Image (cartoon, helix red, strand yellow):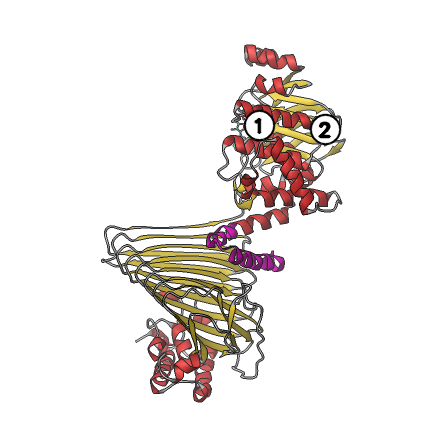
Amino acid sequence: MNMQASQTRTAAETALIDTFTARLPALPGDASVTAKRKEAVAALRARGLPNRKIEAWHYTDLRRLLTAIPAFDARNEAKPVAPLLGGSAVLPILNGKAGRAAAIEGVTVVTAAEKLADGSFAPALQPATDDDAVGAINAALAADGWFLDVAPGAAPADPIELQSVQAGGQAHTRLAAHVGEGAKATVVERHVGTGDALVSSVANIVVGEGAELRWLIVQEQPGGATHLGQFNAWIGRNAKLTVFVMNLGGKLVRQEIRVDAKGEGGEFTLRGVNLLAGSTHCDVTMVLDHSAFGTNSTEVIRNIVTDRAEGAFQGQIRVKQQAQKTDAKMACNTLLLSDEGGFSVKPELEIFADDVACGHGATVAEIDRNSLFYLMARGIDEKTARGLLVKAFLAEVIEELEDEAIVEALEAKLDGWFAEHG
Amino acid sequence: MLEIRNLHARIAETGTEIIRGLNLTVKSGEVAAIMGPNGSGKSTLSYVLAGREDYEVTEGEILYNGESILDLDPAERAAKGIFLAFQYPMEIPGVATMEFLKVAVNSQRKARGEEPLKVPEFLKRVREACASLSIDMAMLKRPLNVGFSGGEKKRAEILQMKLLEPKLCVLDETDSGLDIDALKIVADGVNALRSPERAIVVITHYQRLLQYIVPDSVHVLYKGQVVKSGDKDLALELEANGYAGVIEEAA
Ligand SMILES: Nc1ncnc2c1ncn2[C@@H]1O[C@H](COP(=O)(O)OP(=O)(O)OP(=O)(O)O)[C@@H](O)[C@H]1O
Ligand SMILES: [Mg+2]
């Protein structure tokens, strides 16, 4: 029996359970979906939210940190914003409800509400583990979102933006994509809003044989928001998945990335930049399985921490016995701009194959004084020089995306953040 | 233009004194050469002039156009026209060279109350400067100094100097690492900047550079002091006989 069962319920736990009771009649789902929802809530009742004694939540004591749960309000008016990348096909999710979808060649688009109503999303509502609080909260309350079916060989010309906009309140979003054999696509998962919302968002992605998917998660919610994100993906034979995560906002942020490279020759690339200011707490947790022969991955996370912000990156790489010739490299670098902020890194390699190359490295540093002197010696004032160096530190990772429009859009986000917090 | 009086400076972290009562005057329009054995404090002097925080001035004065610059930070000194061409220019990943040049030029203009340069005018100046230094413009797309060869770094320093048009130029071993043709190109670049309103301090180990950039004065630095000063013939004498004689004489 879990220790927490005997603890008194926190206000947030009570509010989540009450939200479920109140919302259930209005939530889409057949009997199988409703059963999954009830299981998830029963687990929450029994175990409560995870605290720091649960290993996966060691750096983010959700029980302590999740304090206020804003009420769901169907009348909240969330207005769509311009897409990150010009020319994108936008699929909006406004106050948790799918809006009008743009037509996209080669892609079939269905709302998550429909997929829940007909029960086809039921299996996906199963939380990944007993400690999967994000999966459980989302399973209980998910109301809408999008399912994308990219036809084999399709290569939509324009990026697709899944745009979640929240004006306070609560939203629980489900996203899913099936990228067919040999297809190629770029998807932006965007989280923006006004007001202090609670958002959970779970995405389940299957990348088919030989397909190439680029998935950008751009989380720029207001400073009081709570964001619980989860990205699950399965990479097929010779397929390529690139995930780019950018966290620029929110008060309490947990972004989980669970990937299984399960087809031979599959490739996974993770790049992340976290810009943490104020009293933000941001946790990026990755669990990566190399389950097949000759799968490669690289992970690079770069963080800027200022004010009293706190961050964490947990990166777990598990190489199965059959996954010989795996090559995995992970790095996490942090620039600490204030004495009060902090960043924790926990790399974990579990290797059961003998012919593999795996490595990881982590650094926490301040701005390099020598570089700063060099720039200032050319007449660049200290503030500007610091800004240049900080931006350079992040831009290195962004520029690896090698797509001019994407690099430009993401660097513009950096500039915006520095203008506000620099 | 530059007057250094009884300067004492030490490494901030350890307190080790490197500059020990140094006196030096360089007039407007003058080209002064500083020579001296390895470790005598030449680079340290250049850093102290530029305002590097790692060094602490404990005594003495540095007057630039009659005013003390000791309280100014490196950016303020640069905006006043002091430029140091580094012995070992730093590599700065992620900052594109071209972007850096633009920010540097416009930061200095701003500090002097001038309008920023319009992009076409800026590019024109960069193109001209690159042409005169045989620098391929493609190099400027790369991150600042990252992966530049030794000679490319030195040329990039002179490119910056040309664009920033400083009043007091300090060149720390700009000749080291340059091939014979590059030495000539760089020397021509420096000579082109010679003017009555400008002073140039050339730190070097070799007479060869001084054949191209003929100095008005030569100073020998030893253990943090100027132990001997003379005209260009002093460099020839050092080249022929080494430092031993000069050092003994001073002791
Ligand atoms: N930050 C520092 N920490 C420790 N020692 C230092 C530091 N800076 C300078 N020094 C020491 O001070 C002395 C003078 O160094 P400096 O680089 O100024 O010599 P230099 O005359 O430029 O020599 P070179 O001709 O080899 O370039 C040397 O002994 C050097 O090791
Ligand atoms: Mg030196």
Residue A178 versus residue A39 in the image, above or below: above
Identify which residue, A226 or B144, lies in the foreground.
Answer: B144
Across and down, in percent, residue B132 comes to: 62, 31
Q: Give the image quarter of residue B210.
A: top right
Residue A393 versus residue A132 in the image, above or below: above
Q: Is residue A181 left or right of residue B123?
A: left
Closer to the N terminus: mark 2 or mark 1? 1
**Residue A406 among magenta residues:** yes
Across and down, in percent, residue A188 comes to: 48, 65
Across and down, in percent, residue A144 comes to: 45, 79
**Residue at coordinates 52% horizontally, 48% vertically from top-left?**
A366
Circles 2 and 1 on the same chain: yes
Task: Tell me the amino acid under the disc marked 1.
Answer: Thr
What range of the chain is rendered magenta?
A393-422
Q: Give the image quarter of residue B195.
A: top right
User: Is any part of residue A313 visible from this angle?
Assistant: yes
Task: Tell me the amino acid under the disc marked 2.
Answer: Arg
**Residue at coordinates 41% horizontally, 69% vertically from top-left?**
A230
**Residue A71 among magenta residues:** no
- How many numbered circles are shown? 2
Q: Is residue B78 left or right of residue A368?
A: right
Q: Which residue is labeled 2 in the image?
A: B198
The chain containing the residue under callout 1 comes to B
Q: Residues within 10 Å of mark 2 (few under 14, many from 20)?
A: some
